[in-house]
Image (cartoon, helix red, strand yellow):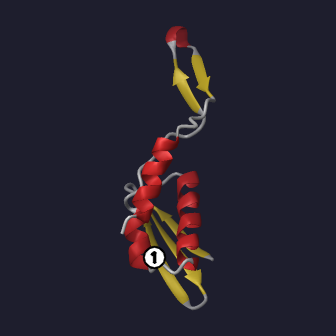
Amino acid sequence: MIASIERKDSGSQVILLNKSNEYRIAVPFIDHASVENVISCACVMLVLGYDATTINERILKLSAIDMRLQLNHSINDSLVINDSYSADKTPNEVENRKIRAT
């Protein structure tokens, strides 16, 4: 269960409760979607038996990626909505290696 989420300038602090244990997770992001994704990852890692120190170390190695929808300012005061989504595996593979690294 999520006990609290505190957003700061440099990131967020998430407190998770599992049975009688409290886990404090440092998140290097402040936007809602990224924090929610990290919470999901942290919960899975807890279920898989990772300790809070390892989870924190690995989550802090994550880097931000562009969101799927982008609003770009263009010539003549027009706006271009970029709704393309990269199917390039490389960024995902890099992040997966960061999480798996020990």
* Figure check: 83 above or below 48: above
Say which of 6 and 86 sits in front: 86
* Residue 67, image quadrant: top right
* Figure check: 78 above or below 50: above
Number of other residues with Cα within 10 Å of mark 1, as a class: few under 14, some 14 to 19, many 20 or more: some
Q: Is residue 80 left or right of residue 92?
A: right
Question: Percent x, y for residue 90?
Answer: 46, 42
Instruction: Read off the residue under disc 1.
Output: 24
Residue extending furthest bottom?
Answer: 20
Question: Percent x, y for residue 76?
Answer: 53, 8
Q: Is residue 26 visible?
A: yes
Image quadrant holding the N terminus, namely: bottom right
Image quadrant holding the C terminus, namely: bottom left
Q: Is residue 29 visible?
A: no
* Figure check: 75 above or below 12: above
Q: Residue at x 59, y 65 (%)?
A: 40
Q: Is residue 19 left or right of residue 96?
A: right
Q: Secondary structure at mark 1?
A: strand
In this rendering, the count of numbered labels is: 1
Q: Residue at x 53, y 72 (%)?
A: 45
Question: Percent x, y for residue 83?
Answer: 63, 29
Residue type indicated by callout 1 = Arg
Question: Percent x, y for residue 10?
Answer: 37, 56
* Residue 81, image quadrant: top right
Residue extending furthest top?
Answer: 76
Q: Is residue 75 left or right of residue 80?
A: left
Q: Residue at x 52, y 81 (%)?
A: 49
Say which of 33 and 46 sits in front: 46
Say which of 99 and 63 sits in front: 99
Q: Residue at x 57, y 58 (%)?
A: 37
